[in-house]
Every structure is written in structure tokens, then in C-alpha cells.
Image (cartoon, grey):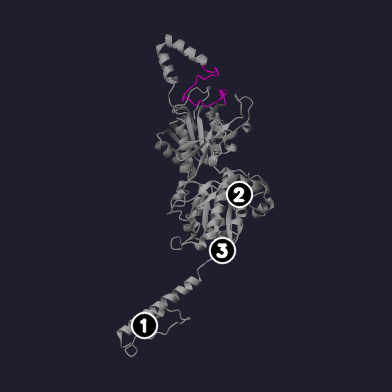
């Protein structure tokens, strides 16, 4: 045990055990041995204590992959916005230009060694490619990669995210669909990591709530118009369902969807990445589920973002984004809020890791999962595998201006996303968070082929008679035919009886699709 003592700080001289030096008394030997062991333990503990980091780091580098401006620019601004909370550490933002998947990997291999934090802010496919390369010493926190493949810690051990998985976002869309009475749907899926994950998230939750997927079709990201038509035609024309959930980048199939008049023939539901005015303006009446932001914190942050010194961002992203890209990143983008929350969590982790229990959290990657804070998107906390624990979703409906009852003369730019509900777990609410009552309009469906618009009827599942006179005459005709032709009457009763669910939505393409809330 004497060899354990530090050679440069001899606290006691211990003789080797030989016959000539061994104490004659066993008790004296025991006391001397115990004393030497105690001194050795103290000597060993002293240097360990002296080298323990007891203060926050003086500086840290936050690396932001410059793939998508709305999330990257917000991530850079968040470092300045939250800096006052961590005065002991100077945070520097470093932009990594990454116009392609190959560049993402190359930039990390070349420049990643200087990063204390890395945020990608792009597709799940890019995150899956770079994730195995990020060491556990780096706070690897993403704000946009949602694929459930990244939940596997055997292949992605250091990956953490503030954006929930596709199972949460797509599941919220399923909760809303079932609440509307739409218990039969078809699924259109882009065949990549994101599309497959979203489709699975919707189908799993939908089935758990009693819904049934009738058709499921996937398309390649590079599908041409002819192949798209072959995929979509049977889905649209042979399906008895009139509800279509779309998982993936729908704009790739815009031309074909319009050619088959899908927006007027089927109720379209989207989630997450597709839930933007730009994407859904081509599909009037569509619904989408998107993660919600907290009104109070978001307004304060957005005001500061709008008033920011943009020249700082021009310098940070010089060579990565154009100045127009920086200026066009809106203040109220949801994905920007996710990017800001990712940076906020990273700053909290970096500034407090020095005081963490290193036995419980031996690496920065382990410690990130213990961070819990109130972000722009609500309470941010993590599951053991690095996925976000909870999230609230808002349901939006692509609607025309208030009071419009006819599609004639309306352009895509006339439509806008209107929040119609909040989904929290399996519960649906009509108010926003923090007790602020929202004047949410009723969900609506529109036939762009001339059927007109009307709000949902809250007291009926299927009510196509209406008060506007649009279908009262057909009811009289049906009654007359029923008296003359029994078979036709029976078919009319089956097709129009009240109380049916909206599993099989109205097949009449010229009549509005009435929903309830």
C-alpha cells in the first residue's frame, strides 16, 4: 500500500516488511498499517479534488448546421437572447454550411472537433447520417428531426431532441380525426425515414383509438407524374374512405393530386413539416397538426427577434445563407421556436454540467437528458432515450377569409391556416394554453369545384340537408322516387340516413363535407 502514496508529496516513510524491520508487537504493526492506509487514501483523494471543475466553462462553441434558414437563424439568435441567463460563459455561434447530405457529414468531420453543442435543424435523413459521428462529450440536440429511427440508442447513442417524435405529431392528427368521427382513412406515404415514421405514427394511434386504415401507398421522393398517377388513382377512386392522411412532402405530388381533384374529393390531413401556409394553400379545407408554442414567452421572444441586429446574423451565416434568407426567416415560425429551445437546452446543460453528479452523468450526452426548462414550446424534458417527453399540438384548418361562401375568384393566397383546436394527449380543447381563450373558428371543408363552404354542424355527424336550401330539393325528389321505385328508395335511405359516422365521408363531390366539433 505504500506504493500508492504520491512520490512528490511524501507524508510518511514506510519501511518495507522484512524480518529486521518488522515490529515485534502485532498490535503496533496493525496500528502502523492502518495509519499508512488512511494517509494513502487522503493523499489519493487530494489531487482528485484539486482537479475537479467547480465553475462553469468560460467559453463554449455552439455549432449550427446551416441547412434550413428558419431554424438555423433562430438558433443563432437564441444564443444572444438567453446569454444573460449564463453570465459566466461566453457562447459563440459557429455556422457550418451544408447544402447537401454529403456536406453535412464532411462539415462535421472537418469542423466538429471545436463544437460543444451541435444542432442540425434539418431532415431526419441528415440527422441519421451524422448522428453516429457525434461523441458523447458534445451536447447533440436537434429541433427538427422527428423520425422514430433516431430513438434507437444502440445506433444513435448521443442524439437528443426538443422536437417530439413523429409518433406524437402524427398521433395528434389521429386523435383529431377520430374525434371528428372519421374512423376509416387511407394513408399516402413518402418512402423515406420521415415519411415512413409519420405514417406509422398515425396508423398506430389511429388503430389504438378504433380507426381503420383502408389503403396505404408510398411513393419515392423522385417519383415522376406518371408514376404518381399510377399510385394515386386506385387510392382515390377505389377507396370507400374519403379521408386521406399524407405523410411526407406533399408538394412533390401537387400536380397529380390536383389532376385527380383530391382536395375536393377527400378530406386531407397533414402533420408537422407540411403544416405551413405555403404547403397547404394548394389544398383548401385541409387539416394539419402542428406543435404549439406558449403565447406569453413566444410573444416576448418574437418581439426581440424582430428588433434584432441582423448584421450579426449576416456575419454568422456569411457563405452559408444569403442575406435574403436571413431576413426572410419569420419571427413566428414554429420551427424557429424549436431551434431556439434546442439552443436554450444546450446552454443550460453546458453552463451547469460542472456541478453535475459525474457518477450518474459521466458524459455531457447523459447529462442533457436531465435538463428540464420552460421553453417557447412549453416544458422541455427528456425521456431516457433522449426523446422529448411531452408536447401540445394545435390543429389548423386551411380556410378562406371570414364570410366567404363561394370559391369563385379566390386565389391560393386568399387562404390561411386557422387554429381550430388543441390536442393534449388524447384530449381535445378549444382554448389556447395559459388560460387565454381563443376565438377558434369552426372546422370547415371546401369543395373547390363549386360546392361552396359552410361551418361544421355541431349537432350532427352527417347532415347534408342544411338550412341553406342547397340540398332540400333533392330530399323531395328522393321521397317521390321512394314511393315509385322501392329499390332506389332503399339505396337513398342507406346513403343519406342521419347518425352515420363520417367513416365513409359524403361521396357527392358537389356537396360540402360537413364535420362537427
Q: Secondary structure at mark 1?
A: helix
- Relative depth, front residue between 232 and 250: 250
| Residue 464 falls inside the magenta stretch | yes
Q: Secondary structure at mark 3?
A: loop
* Residue 241, picture quadrant: top left
Instruction: Name the outermost residue toward the top.
Output: 484
Tell me if 13 is positioned left or right of 432 in this view. Answer: left
Vertical arrangement, residue 480 with respect to residue 265, above or below: above
Which residue bears the numbered disc 1? Answer: 32
* Residue 287: percent from left, percent from top: 53, 34
Work out how far the residue at label 1 is from the one at label 3, CA to CA, in angstroms.
43 Å
Vertical arrangement, residue 20 with respect to residue 514, above or below: below
Tell me if 367 is positioned left or right of 306 in this view. Answer: left
Work out whether residue 323 can be spotted: yes
Work out how far the residue at label 2 is from the one at label 3, CA to CA, in angstroms.
24 Å
Mark 2 touches mark 3? (CB < 8 Å)? no
Locate the N terminus and report the quarter of the image it occupies: bottom left
* Residue 457: percent from left, percent from top: 51, 25
Pointer 1 or 2: first along the chain: 1
Q: Secondary structure at mark 2?
A: helix
| Residue 457 falls inside the magenta stretch | yes
Span shown in magenta: 448-471
Q: How many C-alpha atoms fall within 10 Å of the one at disc 2: few (<14), some, or many (≥20)?
A: many
Work out how far the residue at label 1 is from the one at label 2, CA to CA, in angstroms.
65 Å
Which residue bears the numbered disc 2? Answer: 74
* Residue 64: percent from left, percent from top: 58, 54
* Residue 135: percent from left, percent from top: 49, 59
Which residue bears the numbered disc 3? Answer: 57
Vertical arrangement, residue 148 with respect to residue 438, above or below: below
Q: How many C-alpha atoms fall within 10 Å of the one at disc 3: few (<14), some, or many (≥20)?
A: some
Amino acid at each position: 500500500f505504500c506504493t500508492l502514496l504520491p512520490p512528490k508529496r511524501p507524508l510518511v516513510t514506510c519501511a518495507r516488511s522484512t524480518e529486521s524491520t518488522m515490529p515485534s508487537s502485532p498490535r503496533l504493526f496493525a496500528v502502523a498499517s492502518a495509519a499508512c492506509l488512511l494517509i494513502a487514501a487522503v493523499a489519493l483523494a487530494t489531487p482528485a479534488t484539486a482537479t475537479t471543475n467547480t465553475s462553469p466553462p468560460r467559453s463554449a462553441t455552439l455549432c449550427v448546421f446551416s441547412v434550413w434558414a428558419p431554424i438555423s437563424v433562430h438558433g443563432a439568435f437564441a444564443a444572444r437572447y438567453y446569454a444573460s441567463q449564463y453570465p459566466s460563459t461566453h457562447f459563440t455561434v459557429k455556422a457550418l454550411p451544408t447544402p447537401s447530405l454529403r456536406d453535412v457529414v464532411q462539415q462535421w468531420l472537418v469542423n466538429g472537433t471545436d463544437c460543444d453543442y451541435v444542432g442540425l435543424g434539418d431532415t431526419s435523413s441528415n440527422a441519421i447520417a451524422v448522428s453516429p459521428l457525434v461523441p458523447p462529450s458534445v451536447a447533440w440536440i436537434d429541433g427538427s428531426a422527428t423520425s422514430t429511427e433516431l430513438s434507437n440508442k444502440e445506433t444513435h447513442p448521443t442524439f437528443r431532441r426538443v422536437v417530439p417524435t413523429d409518433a406524437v405529431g402524427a398521433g395528434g392528427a389521429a386523435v383529431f380525426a377520430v374525434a371528428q368521427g372519421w374512423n376509416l382513412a387511407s394513408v399516402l406515404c413518402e418512402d423515406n425515414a420521415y415519411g415512413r415514421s409519420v405514417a406509422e405514427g398515425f396508423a398506430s394511434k389511429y388503430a389504438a383509438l378504433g380507426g381503420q386504415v383502408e389503403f396505404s401507398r408510398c411513393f419515392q421522393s423522385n417519383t415522376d407524374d406518371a408514376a404518381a398517377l399510377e399510385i394515386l388513382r386506385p387510392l382515390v377512386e377505389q377507396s370507400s374512405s374519403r379521408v386521406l392522411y399524407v405523410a411526407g412532402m406533399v408538394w412533390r405530388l401537387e400536380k397529380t393530386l390536383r389532376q385527380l381533384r383530391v382536395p375536393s374529393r377527400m378530406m386531407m390531413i397533414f402533420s408537422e413539416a407540411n403544416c405551413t401556409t405555403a404547403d397547404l394553400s394548394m389544398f383548401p379545407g385541409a387539416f394539419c397538426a402542428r406543435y404549439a408554442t406558449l403565447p406569453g414567452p413566444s410573444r416576448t421572444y418574437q418581439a426581440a427577434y424582430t428588433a434584432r441586429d441582423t448584421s450579426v446574423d449576416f456575419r454568422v451565416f456569411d457563405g452559408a445563407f444569403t442575406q435574403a434568407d436571413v431576413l426572410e426567416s419569420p419571427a413566428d415560425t414554429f420551427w424557429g421556436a424549436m431551434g431556439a429551445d434546442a439552443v436554450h437546452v444546450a446552454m443550460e446543460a453546458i453552463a451547469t454540467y460542472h456541478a453535475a453528479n459525474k457518477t450518474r452523468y459521466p458524459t455531457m450526452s447523459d447529462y442533457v437528458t436531465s435538463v428540464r426548462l420552460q421553453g417557447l414550446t412549453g416544458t422541455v424534458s427528456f425521456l431516457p432515450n433522449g426523446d422529448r417527453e411531452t408536447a401540445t399540438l394545435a390543429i389548423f384548418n386551411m380556410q378562406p377569409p371570414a364570410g366567404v361562401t363561394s370559391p369563385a375568384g379566390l386565389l391560393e393566397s386568399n387562404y390561411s391556416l386557422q387554429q381550430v383546436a388543441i390536442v393534449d394527449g388524447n384530449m381535445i380543447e378549444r382554448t389556447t394554453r395559459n388560460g387565454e381563450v381563443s376565438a377558434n373558428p369552426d372546422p370547415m371543408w371546401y369543395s373547390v369545384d363549386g360546392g361552396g363552404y359552410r361551418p361544421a354542424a355541431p349537432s350532427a355527424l352527417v347532415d347534408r340537408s342544411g338550412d341553406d336550401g342547397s340540398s332540400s330539393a333533392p330530399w323531395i325528389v328522393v321521397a317521390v322516387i321512394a314511393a315509385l321505385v322501392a329499390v332506389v328508395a332503399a339505396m337513398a335511405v342507406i346513403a343519406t340516413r342521419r347518425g352515420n359516422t363520417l367513416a365513409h365521408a359524403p361521396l357527392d363531390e358537389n356537396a360540402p363535407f360537413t364535420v362537427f366539433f
